[in-house]
Every structure is written in structure tokens, then in C-alpha cells.
Image (cartoon, rainbow, N blue to C red):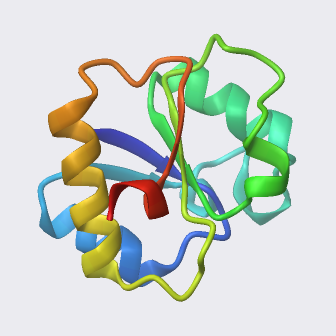
Amino acid sequence: MELIADENVETEWVQALRDDGHDVVRVVDIEGLGVSATDPEVLGDAIQRNRVLLTADQSDFSDPPTDDHPGIIIIADVTRTGGQVRRAVRRIERSVSDLSGHVAYVSDWL
């Protein structure tokens, strides 16, 4: 899965997903976005790059302003381990053929 990790995503989660073969780009590493990127900019970039947005920001992304996005995975419980996030993303991949327009919560897939 190709993902874009919001600035609030833990390094441990990113590394666990990369170790599992996922292509994860961090918002903080993207020129033109970085740590000061707004939520609409982050979502817009995810749409432009066709990458699933990985975020811990449920208040701003649980009800996105558009259904025209490649998918959003929310890690609402920031105490989740990298292994838990990896397992949840594996289950999402196996069960949902196309995450486009959907919001998935890691807690629902553990």
C-alpha cells in the first residue's frame, strides 16, 4: 500500500509499515508541505499522489470534506504499537479491495 503519513504519525508506526513492505512518505519530508502543512493541504497532497492518508488526527479526518480521496486510516489511540498498526493495515488490505472514499480506524481492525 502506498501511504502518506501525517505529521502526527509516530516514527515507530512508519517503520513498522515500511518493514512490512509498504511505501510510506512522511508529510514532514515533502517539499512544500512539511510540519506547517494544513489538513486540507495534506489531504490534497494525498489525493494528488493517490496515497492513502495515515493519521492520528481523527477530529479533522473522520469526516473528510470530500469522498474523492484514496482512503484514510486513522490511528485514534496514540499508544498503539508499530506491530498493532502493521497488523491492522494488513487486515484492511486483505478485506478492503479499494479503500478509496473510505475512512478506516485501526482500532476496528485489531
Residue ID at (83%, 34%): 40
Image location (x, y in percent) of residue 106: 45, 59
Q: Please determine whether, in this image, residue 32 is positioned above or below residue 103.
A: below
Q: Is residue 55 left or right of residue 49?
A: right
Q: Please determine whether, in this image, residue 69 is positioned above or below residue 110.
A: above
Quadrant of the snapshot with the N terminus: top left
Residue ID at (70%, 33%): 43
Image location (x, y in percent) of residue 28: 63, 62
Quadrant of the snapshot with the C terminus: bottom left
Image location (x, y in percent) of residue 20: 13, 62
* Count of labels in the image: 0
Residue ID at (43%, 52%): 25
Residue 57, visible in the rendered structure:
yes
Of the pair 63 and 18, the residue shown nearer to us = 63
Of the pair 6 and 79, the residue shown nearer to us = 79
Residue ID at (76%, 16%): 66
Q: Is residue 110 left or right of residue 8?
A: left
Q: Is residue 110 left or right of residue 29?
A: left
Residue 17, visible in the rendered structure:
no
Q: Is residue 11 left or right of residue 19?
A: right
